[in-house]
Amino acid sequence: MALIDVAIACLNSIREIEEDVKDAIVYIDAGCTESFQLAGAFPLFLELGARSVCSLENMTSLDAVADWNSKLDCANRIVIMTSRLLNDAHRYMLRCLSTHAGVHRCSVFTSISEGSHSACPDSPLGPDAYREYETLLVQDYNEHTKKSDKISKDKGVPKFSSALESLTMEPITSQNVDDPSGDAEGLVVSVHHFPLIICPFTPRAFVLPSQGSVAEASLSRQHEDSLSFGLPPISTGSMSDTDDVPPGATLTAHFLYHLALKMELKLEIFSLGDVSKNVGKIMTDMSSLYDVGRRKRTAGLLLVDRTLDLITPCCHGDSLFDRIFSSLPRGERFSTQAQLKQGVPSIDRPSLDVQVPLGELLSEEPSKIKESGLPEGVEAFLRGWDSYTSDPQNECDHKKSTELLNGSLVATECFRGTPYLEAMIERRTKDGSVLVKKWLQEALRRENISVNVRARPGYATKPELQAMVKALSQSQSSLLRNKGIIQLAAATAAALDESQSAKWDAFSSAEMMLNVSAGDTSQGLAAQISDLINKSALAELQAKKNEKPDSSSSRGLLSFRDALLLTVVGYILAGENFPTAGSGGPFSWQEEHFLKEAIVDAVLENPSAGDLKFLDGLTEELESRLNRLKSEDTKETPSDDQLDIDALDDDPWGKWGDEEDEEDTSKADESYDDMQLKLDLRDRVDSFFKFLHKLSSLRTRNVPLREGSLASESSFPGDPSGNKGLLYRLITKVLSKEEIPGLEYHSSTVGRLFKSGFGRFGLGQAKPSLADQSVILVFVIGGINGREVMEAQEAVGESGRPDIGLVTGGTTLLTPEDMFELLLGQFSHF
């Protein structure tokens, strides 16, 4: 039986539009760039005859010159691919058409279906969205062409979306949407659906583009059960089908439905969590009798709310994949100037474009430009690439060209048929790094290159990997032949660097201590959290006094911001182990009082430590107070010369009278302001702890977790299943056909017909089981991390069911830093 390969499916979808791509300039937005980069699709566009592939948001008129196929005639066809709603990408598409005046045909491919445009409140388009948009784009293009002379004289960016924006003020009717052929003036626009714009990390694991409309859409509206705009609310079971479904749930449902349609799968849908149930219901309502029998292959779809397990993405698990994505810099996110839509903001997810520091790794001493260590051919190539702005005598230009040599991870790069990323994501840190080292050694043997480096069996270190990568990159031919393993090895070496690994290990050790303390007493856990807060605040304060915040002496120490993330982990653990310890939270009043005082003291000593939402509006006042106190301390510590002058003062009485009254009044006002500021700060800290109480109640308020069968069975590291995430436990129980509380099955159209009509005659349809499916797709609404992908495959391997093809997906890729931003940053619901 052929298993599902989402990376190949993405590439095959591109091959299906060969006729449109051939001899055309292809423009892709930021979300498509993430998808096609991970899928390794750019060489495919060249193979299909595309003239060039360019950025939609950063397009210029020079894009027409960058022709891969060296054709002399001007391009008259453009293909635009977007992962956004058409109205969101409209101004970029219009600017693209207006810049290339000689274009006669424009094919638009969007990952957002017509049904999504019609159902999404942010879109003014109706059920016939594609045809309507074809008309509107041509209408705006013709209007802009007529006014081009006037616009060229104006300063700033012209406003293109006049016709489309008018639709937000009036409903679409046949009167304001005419046939595009009448006023096209030679321009033909066609809009098509292209659902497979996904980011495949492996053939069996994917997420959605972070800069696409589906991933950016809010998953929750602000109410008492919500935690963040970017996470589903707590699954209390109170959300009914008639409630206002968040836009993220609607877009996710349409995406998954069309994904299954494209891959010819008939889905048996199961859900766990309130938002997942809404998504499953929308998908079921979209199905019809016409769909039955069209897709011969059945598969199970398990939808899971991220809020059922927040502790796994918050923790620093033993995953090399997670270390790489947490350690390496990401590509800059394109600014979309997102505003509040329908009362909820769009979520700024971090870019999935990992910047692998190849130039830094290949250079022995990046700070010394003259001794760069780059291979001579590679250095010449970089200088030639940037020659139009560089000066050969300018060291800064060389440094700039060196920074251009950044790599990226590609899911389709293989070693003897095995994708690099797939083999790495399913291994822990030590095993994964050793595997990368073995691949490098094999590549060196193939190239007949010898490396004199001390190799420790069973371990991989950054110096070893760096020496092998440099040897393998000496010639351009070797660099190109082995680019996949070179980029992966460079990413691994950067993640294993002491500056990165020390902090990750410190986090992991602290989380283990909290885990052990949670199995003991609430007093011990509260003391551990308080100790982490005090130590981190003291370390940051000391580093700030020394004015060396990035010095090697502070390397590996946890910051106050990190301690707050550990506080979140501690409260979730406390809620699982001590649900009734305090009246409003898992700790007693006295234990929580000490924690509050520790946070208040830390903020007063260093107000700028961390961008915290609960301090919005207070940070500047706290900073000015701290600076004033420092200046007063300086004045109260006079120098020896000042003491001598005061000793010779003829007036022994000092200041008195009106001057003394004014000084006392000023001090009284400052004292009052300080007291008021401290009271405001304590109120903010109290609201922060109320939010922590909500996090600690996840186990008791989440209906699927109340009975305890899905909750962690043990908090001790000795238990092999106690430290596993929810997905591992869930898949294990599913494949063992155990009863799972809260798991809901969504009947298909035919199933509902049997249940309501033929069921009275004894012809009811039996409820299917996920374990009976040969293909299971698990999709986590809110996001996943690499550790969960690894554990999900482990659960399948341990079940003794090698025939099952498991595909894991999620809204986005989550790192602990991302969870901090969602829970405590600008998208949090305090």
Image (cartoon, helix red, strand yellow):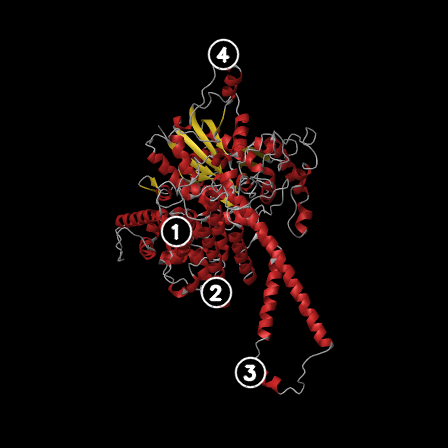
Instruction: Return the residue at label 2.
Output: 543
Residue 323 position within the rendered picture, expressed as x and y whole percent measured from the top left: 41, 50
Q: Which mark is residue 491?
A: 1
Residue 203 relative to residue 292: left or right? left
Q: Nearer the viewer, residue 80 or 302?
A: 302
Which residue appears at 33% of the width and 50% of the height? 477
Tell me the amino acid under the disc marked 2: Ala
Mark 3 vs mark 1: give the one in front: 3
- Tell me the amino acid under the disc marked 4: Phe
Q: Count the marks: how many?
A: 4
Distance from disc 4 to disc 1, alpha carbons, whole Å, reads 63 Å
| Separation of marks 1 and 2 at Cα, in angstroms | 29 Å
Neighbor class of circle 3 (other Cα within 10 Å; few <14, some 14-19, many 20+) is: few
Residue 465 located left or right of residue 63: left
Residue type (three-letter) at the residue carrying disc 3: Asp
Q: Which residue is mark 3?
A: 640
Choose the circle earlier in sequence order: 4 or 2: 2
Q: Nearer the viewer, residue 609 or 152?
A: 609
Task: Quadrant for residue 711, please give it.
Answer: top left
Q: Secondary structure at mark 3?
A: helix
